[in-house]
């Protein structure tokens, strides 16, 4: 990168770039642990296996090592898990869920908590494959509020990274790889999240999403191969099955099952839908404090999450039956406290609802959530009567943006 590009970045974000701090040797991820990890990676097959995994069995490479050994990387210079990746030159949201590999899941809270304990007790396993990060293309770089240049992103090790961040570790130990962003999803699914490798193994939906992404990528070898077969009026299934067996290490029967599910999907299949969890809700609000979340402040009240403009009491949930009860209960409590409280419920589709989702289905689920909420109002005799007499006002409902077309507008979606 040239000095001009750095200057352009600083002018675009209005912040000067700061250098990361020195490694805090009192924390878990320090120089001593790094040297142990390097020693073990070279004395065992760890590094050899990792480097070999960057080569596709069907031919070609996912990527190459950018730095020959493991190193310490400042967490605040790595793009957070699940946060949308924006091209700062165009302003477009090119990756709604960041470089998150799994289709519907961000991280498992129990797994993250387990890693938090491991890090806290200084029991880090130096014999395991370490976290993997990549160099981001310059158009996806950005500067944080603190002035740190985010020019890298985590592609494997989300649970470990979340755990490190949660307990205020400043650095992580990782391999740094140069990899085209088009290869990240396949590499993560085919290599990193295999059953014998992953903390949380890949699901059939993860594989379907990955192979669908490859078939949609005009630069991929599989896409070109299938297009050639179509022109020759030949079946493309053997080529897809070969890729699943070779690169994804699937049994032929499993590969056939994936193809059947892939054929069942229609043209509206959507792989890029942003999932939310508690941590990602907070991240979204923080990232949009100058746009759709302007004027929000975190609430200390037990029954809502944020205070907003015009005395809004904002409740945030994802859609589940439990959270429907949670939202309704909190709304009732706020109305008991003051019947004039201006309550807004902002919600997102839950991870279990994102399977094979499209815009039409999303709209149905959003409307159903509101219908179910309003039914609870009617079923409560006292509240229902007050609502019928216009003595009590139902909350306003707005959905968190989750599809690419929604995210680029940086607005909540009113749902009526």
Image (tube, grey):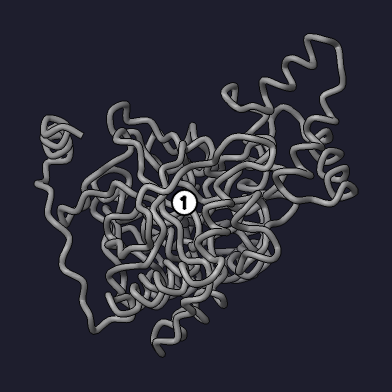
Q: Which residue shows up at 35% across the image and 52% down it?
A: 67
Q: Is residue 374 visible?
A: no
Q: Which residue shows up at 87% across the image and 46% down it?
A: 252
Q: Nearer the viewer, residue 285 or 68?
A: 68
Question: Is 48 on the left or on the right of 229, as rendered?
Answer: left
Can you give x and y, in whole percent of width and height, for residue 246 in the image? 75, 43
Question: Is 15 on the left or on the right of 239, as rendered?
Answer: left
Image quarter of residue 11: top left
Can you give x and y, in whole percent of width and height, for residue 154 in the image? 42, 55
Q: Nearer the viewer, residue 60 or 206?
A: 60
Q: Nearer the viewer, residue 354 or 155?
A: 155
Identify whether 237 is placed above or below 325: above
Most extreme residue toward the front, as rendered?
A: 43
Image quarter of residue 351: bottom right
Crowd class of label 1 (few under 14; some 14 to 19; many from 20; radius 10 Å): some
Where does label 1 land, which residue? 396
Identify whether 218 is placed above or below 150: above
Image quarter of residue 186: top right
Q: Which residue shows up at 71% across the image and 47% down it?
A: 248
Can you give x and y, in whole percent of width and height, for residue 243 in the image? 74, 38
The quarter of the rendered structure image containing the C terminus is top right
Identify whether 217 is placed above or below 189: above
Can you give x and y, in whole percent of width and height, for residue 44 in the image? 53, 71
Most extreme residue toward the bottom, as rendered?
A: 121
Q: Which residue shows up at 36% across the image and 42% down it?
A: 136
Q: Is residue 365 visible?
A: yes
Q: Nearer the viewer, residue 247 or 359?
A: 247
The quarter of the rendered structure image containing the N terminus is top left
Question: Is 115 on the left or on the right of 10, as rendered?
Answer: right
Identify whether 188 is placed above or below 36: above
SS at circle 1: strand
């Amino acid at each position: 990168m040239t000095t001009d590009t750095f200057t352009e970045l600083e002018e675009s974000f209005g912040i000067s770039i700061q250098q990361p701090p020195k490694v805090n040797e009192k924390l878990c991820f320090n120089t001593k642990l790094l040297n142990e990890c390097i020693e073990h990676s070279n004395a065992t097959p760890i590094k050899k296996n990792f480097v070999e995994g960057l080569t596709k069995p069907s031919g070609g490479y996912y990527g190459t090592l950018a730095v020959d050994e493991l190193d310490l990387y400042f967490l605040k210079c790595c793009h957070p898990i699940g946060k949308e990746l924006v091209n700062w030159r165009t302003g477009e949201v090119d990756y709604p869920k960041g470089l998150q590999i799994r289709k519907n899941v961000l991280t498992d809270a129990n797994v993250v908590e387990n890693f938090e304990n491991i890090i806290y007790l200084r029991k880090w396993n130096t014999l395991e494959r370490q976290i993997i990060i990549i160099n981001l293309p310059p158009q996806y770089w950005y500067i944080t509020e603190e002035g740190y240049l985010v020019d890298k992103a985590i592609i494997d090790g989300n649970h470990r990274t979340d755990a490190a961040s949660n307990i205020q570790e400043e650095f992580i130990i990782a391999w740094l790889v140069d990899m085209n962003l088009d290869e990240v999803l396949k590499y993560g699914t085919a290599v990193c999240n295999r059953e014998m490798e992953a903390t949380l193994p890949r699901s059939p939906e993860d594989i379907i999403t990955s192979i669908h992404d490859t078939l949609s990528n005009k630069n991929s070898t599989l896409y070109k191969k299938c297009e050639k077969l179509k022109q020759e009026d030949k079946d493309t299934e053997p080529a897809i099955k070969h890729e699943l067996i070779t690169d994804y290490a699937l049994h032929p029967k499993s590969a056939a099952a994936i193809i059947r599910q892939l054929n069942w999907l229609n043209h509206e299949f959507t792989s890029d839908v942003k999932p939310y969890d508690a941590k990602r809700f907070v991240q979204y609000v923080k990232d949009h404090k100058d746009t759709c979340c302007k004027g929000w402040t975190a609430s200390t009240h037990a029954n809502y999450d944020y205070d907003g403009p015009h005395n809004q009491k904002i409740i945030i949930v994802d859609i589940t039956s439990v959270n429907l009860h949670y939202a309704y209960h909190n709304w009732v409590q706020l109305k008991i406290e003051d019947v004039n409280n201006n309550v807004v419920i902002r919600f997102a589709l839950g991870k279990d609802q994102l399977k094979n989702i499209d815009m039409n289905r999303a709209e149905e689920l959003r409307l159903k959530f509101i219908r179910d909420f309003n039914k609870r109002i009617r079923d409560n005799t006292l509240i229902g009567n007050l609502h019928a007499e216009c003595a009590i006002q139902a909350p306003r409902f707005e959905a968190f943006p989750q599809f690419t077309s929604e995210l680029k507008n940086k607005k909540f979606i009113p749902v009526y």
